Amino acid sequence: MSVLVVTGTGTEIGKTIVTAAVAAASAGRRVAVLKPAQTGLRPGEPGDAAEVVRLAGSHVTAVELARFPEPLAPATAARRAGLAPVRPYEVAEAAEKLAAEHDLVLVEGAGGLLVRFDDDGATLADAARLLSAPVLVVAPAGLGTLNSTALTAEALRARGLDCLGVVVGSMPAEPDLAERCNLTDLPVAAGAPLLGVVPAGAGSLRPAEFRARAGSWLAAQLGGVRPADRPAGLGGRADTLGERPG
């Protein structure tokens, strides 16, 4: 697996932090993170790719293809800014170029899988198909996540794309009943394994601590040490920032 596409069931659910965790768990390898479309930021402001480098370390190369100032879907943001949209073939070409020089390329989408890149309806799924790359789905922990995860997985299957697995992007320190049950039910909804549970607030850790702990949140398929589909963390509870991996 030289290229991995990271998508989510929605926005603001932890895609960037999960991408950073995967990059951090891949220390010792040459890693690149590719952000096809960064929205909501002006030139010079640090974006998602820069945040991955800050948290994961200097072994990560960050590439951003396009930036649009308004916090909207890429197609809408590009149109309103009067700028050219990102095209799936451009994403694929950039990822393939990075893959020739890196051991792992992480392509982090904007919003969910089917958010439009352009007014023709192209999406991150189209880029993944051009790359023949597996897709990692980042999902929230709480109510509603089973439906959105199942819909995302169904969209992947309909396009002949491989869902590598699901990662919970932000698990509360004291998960409620739904959040605990969802850890068991998410693999069923996705038809793919649960490959990680990232604790809420992980992005606020010092970078050195983030790097030291990232592997404990992820399964071996993502460079970590957590058993795949393991629904609970230390002592049968979700891992929290107040606990150290054993």
Image (cartoon, helix red, strand yellow):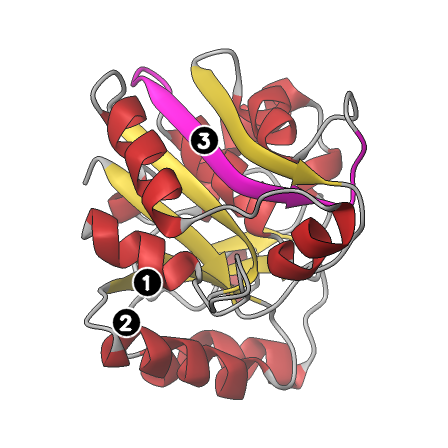
Q: Which residue was labeled with disc 2? A: 192
Q: How many marks?
A: 3
Q: Which residue is mark 3?
A: 33
Q: Residue 34: within the magenta?
A: yes
Relative to 77, is 119 on the left or the right? left
Compared to 161, does 16 lie above or below? above
Q: CA distance from mark 2 to mark 1?
A: 5 Å
Marking on residue 103: none
Which x, y percent locates residue 206? Answer: 71, 24
Query: Which percent across, then down, holds residue 202?
Result: 67, 42
Given the image, on which type of amino acid does mark 3 rest?
Val
Dot 3: few (<14), some (14–19), or many (≥20) neighbours within 10 Å? many
Find numbered disc 3 in the image and state the secondary structure of the residue it sits on.
strand
Q: Is residue 152 visible?
A: yes
Magenta stretch in the rendered image:
27-42
Judge whether residue 41 is colored magenta. Answer: yes
Query: Mark 2 touching mark 1, by CB under 8 A?
Result: yes
